[in-house]
């Protein structure tokens, strides 16, 4: 009987995917792959099965996410012996009216369209990919799995911004993101889950989460994925007066400010380059060092703040591209935190697996 779930996780120039099957009450990715270099001349598609019997390595010029999705679907068609039962999509933000994982209907799609202003960097691309996937994989249900859902357990003191009440009524609150990643870490820890946990998801997008008894009680990102600590190209939190200054003295409108804070700031702005974290570490010049220092200090300060929030810490877990692979960054972050007497670990995030878990649950509920 067909049981495979396809999970799609899109980035700005990449598309990761996995095909999951039930495995002893959990999900196993028996086939994984990615399309990289979308929009560039060096595009590639790779796909490999867990047992090594399928190993696809192709070079493609993929002009768009749709092009990448079609190449992926063609490759899958050659190797899947059974039809899919569902397709799961990582959706960064559902806005104020979609706060739980859900089967995608016309109503849900419209709700996501109405929420674009909450995640203008992510949602338009996700919506386009979602609709194209529905055209390619027509005969199965599609599910939206939200990065915001995990943070619904945060108390009002964490979600409410210091603005007049009517703004909260309109949905201007702290939502939090990377929830699928945080959920996957909680699941990975299993019986070793401590009472007081901080997870640092550090990648081109980066955030931290305070987790008490497996539940999110605070996180760094806010209304949008731009808030919190500085990231690859995003500012993180800023003094609101900065925006007033930019508009009054620089004549910047909302679109110009949005571009600045999402695409030209963070490590890119501080280092005056598009270098990733590994390249910044290798450079060693003053601008690169400043960017690294600002980033590491912001993470270290947040860990300290969350220790105060929870009355101490039992464990800190690093995950995400930087968190998992940049040991020098982890070392800089942890320097000076010995007084906490806390265990530091690295655990691979498994967002796609977490999406598959949610899809399987929703399939069961809808059957």
Image (tube, rainbow, N blue to C red):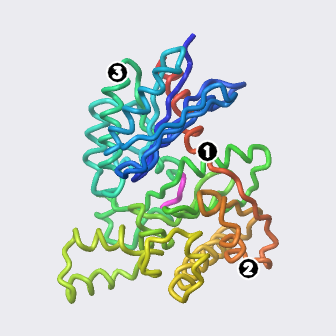
- Sequence order check: which comes first, mark 1 or mark 3? 3
Q: Nearer the viewer, residue 97 or 199?
A: 199
Report the residue at 74% width, 77% height from top.
337
| Residue identifier under label 2 | 335
| Residue identifier under label 1 | 350
Mark 1 and mark 3 in contact? Answer it, CB < 8 Å.
no
Part of the protein shown in magenta: 153-157
Q: Gap between marks 1 and 3, in whole Å?
A: 26 Å
- Sequence order check: which comes first, mark 2 or mark 1? 2
Q: How many marks?
A: 3
**How crowded is the residue under tag 2: few (<14 C-alpha within 10 Å), some, or many (20+)?**
few
Q: Is residue 195 left or right of residue 94?
A: right
Picture quadrant of residue 111: top left
Q: Secondary structure at mark 2?
A: loop
Q: Secondary structure at mark 3?
A: loop
Q: Gap between marks 2 and 1, in whole Å?
A: 27 Å
């Amino acid at each position: 009987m067909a049981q495979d779930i396809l999970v799609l996780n899109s980035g700005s120039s990449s598309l990761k995917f996995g095909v999951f099957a039930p495995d002893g009450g959990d999900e196993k990715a028996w086939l994984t792959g990615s399309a990289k270099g979308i929009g560039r001349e060096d595009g590639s598609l790779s796909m490999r099965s867990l047992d090594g019997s399928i190993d696809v390595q192709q070079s493609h010029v993929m002009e768009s996410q749709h092009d990448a999705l079609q190449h992926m679907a063609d490759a899958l068609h050659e190797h899947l012996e059974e039809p899919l039962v569902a397709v799961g999509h990582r959706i960064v933000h559902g806005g104020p009216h979609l706060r739980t994982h859900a089967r995608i209907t016309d109503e849900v799609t419209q709700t996501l369209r109405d929420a674009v202003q909450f995640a203008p960097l992510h949602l338009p691309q996700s919506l386009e990919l979602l609709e194209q996937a529905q055209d390619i994989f027509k005969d199965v249900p599609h599910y939206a799995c939200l990065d915001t859902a995990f943070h619904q357990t945060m108390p009002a003191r964490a979600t409410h911004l210091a603005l007049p009440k009517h703004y909260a009524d309109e949905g201007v609150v702290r939502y939090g993101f990377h929830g699928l990643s945080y959920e996957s870490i909680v699941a990975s820890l299993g019986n070793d889950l401590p009472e007081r946990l901080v997870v640092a998801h550090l990648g081109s997008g980066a955030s931290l989460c305070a987790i008490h008894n497996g539940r999110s009680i605070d996180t760094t990102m806010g209304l949008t994925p731009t808030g919190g600590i500085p990231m690859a190209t995003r500012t993180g939190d800023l003094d609101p007066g900065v925006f007033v200054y930019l508009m009054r003295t620089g004549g910047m409108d909302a679109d110009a400010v949005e571009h600045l804070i999402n695409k030209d700031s963070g490590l890119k702005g501080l280092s005056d380059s598009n270098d990733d974290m590994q390249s910044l570490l290798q450079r060693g010049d003053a601008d690169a060092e400043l960017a690294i220092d600002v980033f590491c200090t912001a993470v270290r300060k947040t860990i300290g703040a969350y220790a105060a929030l929870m009355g101490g810490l039992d464990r800190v877990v690093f995950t995400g591209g930087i968190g998992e692979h940049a040991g020098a960054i982890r070392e800089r972050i942890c320097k000076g935190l010995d007084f906490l007497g806390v265990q530091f670990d690295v655990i691979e995030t498994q967002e796609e697996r977490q999406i598959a878990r949610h899809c399987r649950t929703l399939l069961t509920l809808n059957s």
